[in-house]
Image (tube, helix red, strand yellow):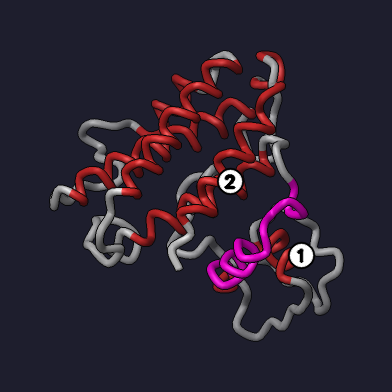
Amino acid sequence: MIPTAGVADAHRHLLRALGGLTDAEVGAPTTLPGWTRGHVLAHVTDAGRALADLVEHAVRGVLIPLYDPATHDRDGIIEATAGRTADEHRSALREHSERLEVAWSRVADWDQPVNYRDGKLSSTVFARWREVWIHAVDVGAATPADWPGDFCEHAVDFLKERLPHDAIVTGPPRALAGWLSGRDTGDGLTGDLPELGPWPGGRPRSGDAR
């Protein structure tokens, strides 16, 4: 099942949790190196814009990269928009999240090719699911305890590649998902917790959760 409804729920949770965010809190640091809360929100928002562009073009049969370096400076956009006011962050996040959900509603074939991840439109949904829930923790809008069970199972399946091949770590899916994503200490897990490997598919930027 393609979890478009799950992503919509994640969007709503994040926006509700950000309802009381102040301008001062936007500039507060996060655990992501060099990133404030505003940087994380700028990243999640611009990723929504980029995914919406990708899906809208794919539905028309046009393949584009998620980020075209000739037209979009990903890091530059994040730096330029990180200092938005809290209201501006909420408005932009809502706009691009809703636009992405509308684009998905027009998809007839989730196996349709895209120039992203495994080459299927379905990968855009799972990527956004991970991005919103994981970065919700970074901005203080959630903890792994808030993550839905089906999301935790997906996250474990995606992130288990970070474990060394000879490592055996067991525990509840939520605890595993939190630890494998670097958003929890691993309390409740059994085994010698090893140093985790790179993010599946590469993690070139500190804010990436896809």
What residue did someone put label 1 on? 175
Task: For marks 1 and 2, give the CA distance.
Answer: 19 Å
- Residue 14 vs 10, above or below: the answer is above
Nearer the observer, 112 or 107: 107
Residue found 30% across the figure and 41% down from its top: 67
- 209 within the magenta span: no
Tally of numbered discs: 2
Residue 209 visible in the snapshot: no
Left or right position of 51 against 126: left
Q: Residue at x 61, y 48 (%)?
A: 133
Amino acid type for the residue under numbered disc 1: Ala
The stretch in magenta equals 143-159
Left-right relation of 133 to 210: right
Q: Residues within 10 Å of mark 2 (few under 14, many from 20)?
A: many
Q: Earlier in the sequence, mark 1 or mark 2?
A: 2
Q: Nearer the viewer, residue 192 or 15?
A: 15
Give the crowd class for mark 1: few <14, some 14-19, many >=20 residues within 10 Å. Answer: many
Which amino acid type is shown beneath numbered disc 2? Ala
Closest to the camera, between mark 1 and mark 2, is: 2
Element at label 1: helix
Q: Is residue 15 above or below residue 148?
A: above
- The one of 15 and 27 positioned closer to us in this rendering: 15
| Position in image of residue 160 (x %, y %) | 59, 73
Looking at the image, the residue that sits furthest to the bottom is 166
Residue 147, given in percent of the width and then of the height, sits at: 68, 55
* Label 2 residue SS: helix
Residue position for label 2? 10
